[in-house]
Amino acid sequence: MSIRTVVWGENVHEQKNKVVADIYPTGMHQCIADALNTDEGITATTATLQEPEHGLPLERLQETDVLLWWGHAAHGDVSDEIVERVAEQVHAGMGLIVLHSGHFAKIFKRLMGTPCNLTWREAGERERLWLTSRNHPIAAGLPDHFELENEEMYGEPFGIPEPMETVFVSWFQGGEVFRSGVTYKRGAGNVFYFRPGHETYPTYHDANVQTVLRNAVKWAHNPAKRIEKPNDAPNVPVETALEPIEERGPKLHQAGEEGYK
Amino acid sequence: MSIRTVVWGENVHEQKNKVVADIYPTGMHQCIADALNTDEGITATTATLQEPEHGLPLERLQETDVLLWWGHAAHGDVSDEIVERVAEQVHAGMGLIVLHSGHFAKIFKRLMGTPCNLTWREAGERERLWLTSRNHPIAAGLPDHFELENEEMYGEPFGIPEPMETVFVSWFQGGEVFRSGVTYKRGAGNVFYFRPGHETYPTYHDANVQTVLRNAVKWAHNPAKRIEKPNDAPNVPVETALEPIEERGPKLHQAGEEGYK
Amino acid sequence: MSIRTVVWGENVHEQKNKVVADIYPTGMHQCIADALNTDEGITATTATLQEPEHGLPLERLQETDVLLWWGHAAHGDVSDEIVERVAEQVHAGMGLIVLHSGHFAKIFKRLMGTPCNLTWREAGERERLWLTSRNHPIAAGLPDHFELENEEMYGEPFGIPEPMETVFVSWFQGGEVFRSGVTYKRGAGNVFYFRPGHETYPTYHDANVQTVLRNAVKWAHNPAKRIEKPNDAPNVPVETALEPIEERGPKLHQAGEEGYK
Amino acid sequence: MSIRTVVWGENVHEQKNKVVADIYPTGMHQCIADALNTDEGITATTATLQEPEHGLPLERLQETDVLLWWGHAAHGDVSDEIVERVAEQVHAGMGLIVLHSGHFAKIFKRLMGTPCNLTWREAGERERLWLTSRNHPIAAGLPDHFELENEEMYGEPFGIPEPMETVFVSWFQGGEVFRSGVTYKRGAGNVFYFRPGHETYPTYHDANVQTVLRNAVKWAHNPAKRIEKPNDAPNVPVETALEPIEERGPKLHQAGEEGYK
C-alpha cells in the first residue's frame, strides 16, 4: 500500500507575490506533492492554511502516514488546537517533515521544546549540502554533496535539541554553516527537518531536493497501527500487578481513581 | 560563589493531607531545600504555587542558577505565562530538575515535546534504582544501586524523547521498570528528570536521594552568562557577510526588515 | 528481494553439553535461522566457528545483508582478521545483530569501543522485557511487555556507549534491571544488541523472541549499495576544489601523495 | 586541586621538517602544554612517542586526569599495548582530547568503533568554526564563530558515530564543511575531538584555539575516583540476590566459576 502523504502549505506568498507565483503557479505545496507522486510508493495530496481546519480535520490526519509542513509568513495564524491535533498524531505514529522556514512553525517548536532560532540572509547565495551520514536512507541515490545555486542562508547556532542523527550540513557562500537535515523521534512519530526551500527560488523543482523529500517520506513512515491514546497514563491496580505484592503504607488515591494531569 | 537554587513546590497536599503534612511538616520544597543547603556550594530557597507569580517573578529567575520542580495535583493551575518564562530561562542557560509527578508538569512537557506519560501504582512497594552510567557526576558518591522501601510505581513505556544520557533505571517489586534518571539539554539549559518522590512516603528524607539532588544541582549549573535573547533570529545583511557576496535573485524581505516568526 | 541473512553460531555448547544439545538439537544458529525463515522477506543461512574462515569468507559477507552473532565460550578463538572483516562490512552497510553473551564478542567490543561488561547470575529466574520505545519497528506486533520464565540474569551497569535508541529494558526476579535492546549506527551499518538467549534455556523457541529477531533483521537491513572502501580518506586537490582557492602557506604533503594512516 | 593533564605529541615533524620546527621550536606538545598551564586550574606536562612506553607508563596514566593526543605520521608506531592501556584508563574515567590528525590515531578508532575517515586538502585555506551548542562549557568565552586564516581542510562525511553533542562545525573556503568539535562518553571517560591543528600552520598559538583546549580539559575532567577494574563482569551468586530467588533449571557454570570472556 502506498504511503498516504499530505503536503501542508501556508499558501500565502503564492497568492500575494508575483515572483513566488511565477515559480510555483500551482503553489509550493502542489509542486512538492507532484514531486512525491512520481514515486509509486507515495500518494500525496495537499492541504492549506485557508481551508476549514487548515485542511487538517482529525479524520484526515488519522489516515495520513506522513505530513509535510511549509509555512513562513503566517505561523501565528495556525490555530493552537490544530497544532495540538497534529502533535498528538505525531506522538501516535504519524511521520512529520518540516521544511525550511517551518523551523519557526508552532508544530516544530511544540515538538522540539526549544527556540528553533537561527541567523538568516536573503541574498540568493550558493548553498552546498554535505552528507554527514553515509548511506542514510534519507540520502539514498544522492552523491556526497549537491548544490543549490540560489538560496536563502540559514546559519548556526540553530536552536534545536541534539538530533538523533545529523544527515546533512550546509555550506554557504557568505561564510556560514547549518545542520540542514536532522532527525528526531517524538513518541512513535519520526520527525525530519530539511532546510532548503525559500519561496523566491525554484528549490522544490530541484531533482536532488525532490529525491530527499521522497526518501524522507519513506523514512518517516511508521507502518505500525497508530497508538490510540498516546497521552494515557493508566493506573495498574495492585491486584493485577505482574508480581504478587501487597499494598503497604499510606495512599493518596482511592481505588479506581484517575491520576492527576 | 555558591549555586543559587530555587525549589519550587506545588504545596497542595502538604496543606490538605495529614499523611503528607506529617512527613513534610515544613513542606516538601522546604525539606528538599534543607537537604541542598547542607552543601556549602549550594544556596537553596523555595517558591510555591500560592505565591504571587507562583514565587517566580522574572527577576528572581534571572538570578536563579538551578530550579527544581515538584508538582502533582495542580499542574493545571500553573499559569501558561510563567511556564513560558521558565522555559525561556532554561533556553538561556538556567538548569532545571524535574521531580517525580512533575513528569506531567507543563514545563516538562513544554521542554520535551512529548506526552511524558507512564503507568503507575500507589502500593508502597519496593523500588531499587540501578546506576546505568558509572561515575556519572549525578551519581557521585553513590553505590551501583540503592533502595527505597516504599514508593509509588512508575512503569515503562515512559513517553519521553531519547535522553542525552540515561543515568538510573528502576526495578519495582510489582514487576515494572522505569528510566528514573535522564538528562537533556534544551537550549543552553541542562535538564534532569528524577523519578522518586511520592508525597505519602519519606523519600526526600532519604540520604541517597538527597545525594542525587545535590549532585544534580551541580551538574545542571551552567556557569556561563545567561543568553540575553534566546529566541532571537538575527538577520545578517549582505554587506556584513563574512565572505564577500553579491545579492542575487528576487527577494521577499526589504533591507532591515524583521523576519517572520 | 528477500533479506540475505546469516546466523553465526559459536556451536560449542551444542556439541559438548547435553542440556544445550537437547534444547537445540540442530544448534542454536539453526533454530534461529529456522525462525527467521518463517518470514518470506528473509532468507537465512548459518555459519559456525568451526568452518573455514568461521564460515565468513569475504565473498559471503559481501552478499550478506544482515549478520546475527551468538558466541559465549569461544570468543577468544575468533580470528582477529575475521573480526576486522566483519567490522569493515558493517561500516560499509551490513546490518549486525548481537545476541546475549555476544556482548563480550570481539566484534561487539570492536564496534562499541567500550568494555561491554555487566553483572550476571545463572539461576533460571524470570525475566520480563518492557518496551521503552512504543511502536518501534523492532517491537512490531509485540505487547508492552513479555516474559521469559527462565533466563540468565544480566545486570546494570552495562558498559556500552549511550545507545541511539533504547528499545527494551528487562526486569529480573532477583532484583536487577538491564537495557536489553539497544540500537547503534556504525558507519553505514545498523547494529542491534538483544539480551535474551542463554543456551541452557529454550529462549530461541519463544514466539516473542522470534518476533523480535525477525523485526530486527528488517530494521537492520540497509538496502543501499555497500560502500566500496569504507576506510578511504581521499585527498581533494586544490585544482578540483568546489570553490576556487589558491594554495597558500607551507605544505607537508607533495601533490598526489597519500595521507598518513 | 588542579587538573593533572598530559599532552601527548608524536613529535616527528618537529624533528624532521623545518617549517614545523620553526613554528613549534619546543614541539607542538610543549606549545599546547604551555597554553594549558596559563590556567591555574590545570597542570600540564608532556609525553612523546620516542620516550619509553611512549611516555605513558601505567602509573603515570593512573595519575592523569585528562590526556590530549596529537599524532599524524606515526600512528602505526604506537604500540597496541599502550593503546589498550589508554583505552582502559578512559573507560575507568580519564578524559581524552583527540586533536586534528589524531582522527586516525589508534586510540580514537579504538574508542569510536568506526573508520574515522574524512576528505582532506592541504592548501592553507581559511577555516571558520561555528558554535552549534550555545553556552557549551567547551565554548566558554568564545564568540559564535572564529577564524583560522590558514588551515588544512577536513571534509564530510566524517566517519564517526553520532556524537553525544556537536559543539563546532567548520566552514572551509574551498567549499567543504566538517563537524569540528564533537563529544562522546566511553565508559566513565569523557572524550572530545577537536579538528584544527595542522602542523605547518601556527594553529596552537591561536588564542581562541587555546581557549577551546583549556575549556575542553575542564569539561573532560571526571573528578570521580577512577574505576578499579573497568572490564570486570562479576557473578552475583543466587544466595546474595537482592530479592530472594531459588535456582531453577539447568546450569552451565558451577558455583564460583568465572564467566567466559
Image (tube, coloured by chain):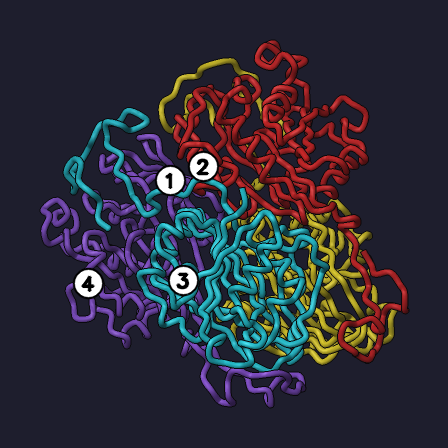
Chain colours: A yellow, B red, C purple, D cyan
Q: Secondary structure at mark 1?
A: loop
**Lower position in the chain sequence, tag 4 or tag 1:** 4
Distance (Cα) linking label 2 and label 4 = 36 Å
Instruction: Indicate the position of residue A121 as horizontal and vertical percent values.
Output: 79, 69
What residue sits right under mark 4 in the picture? C48
Query: Is A140 drawn above or below residue B37 in the view shown?
Result: below
What residue sits right under mark 1 in the picture? C156
Q: Residue at (32%, 70%) from the top-left corner? A: C64
User: Label 1: how many residues lie within 10 Å, few (<14), some (14-19) or many (20+)?
Assistant: many
Q: Nearer the viewer, mark 3 or mark 4?
A: 3
Q: Nearer the viewer, mark 3 or mark 2?
A: 3
Q: Which kind of residue does numbered mark 3 sit on?
A: Ile
Mark number, residue D107: 3
- Determine the image quadrant of residue B53: top right
- On the same chain: label 4 and label 1? yes
Q: Nearer the viewer, mark 1 or mark 3?
A: 3
Distance (Cα) linking label 3 and label 2 = 31 Å
Distance (Cα) linking label 2 and label 1 = 9 Å
Query: Is B53 drawn above or below residue B93 in the view shown?
Result: above
Distance (Cα) linking label 3 and label 4 = 31 Å
- On the same chain: label 3 and label 4? no
Q: Residue at (16%, 35%) from the top-left corner? A: D255
- Determine the image quadrant of residue B89: top right
Q: Which kind of residue does numbered mark 2 sit on?
A: Val
Q: Which kind of residue does numbered mark 4 sit on?
A: Thr
Q: Which kind of residue does numbered mark 1 sit on?
A: Glu
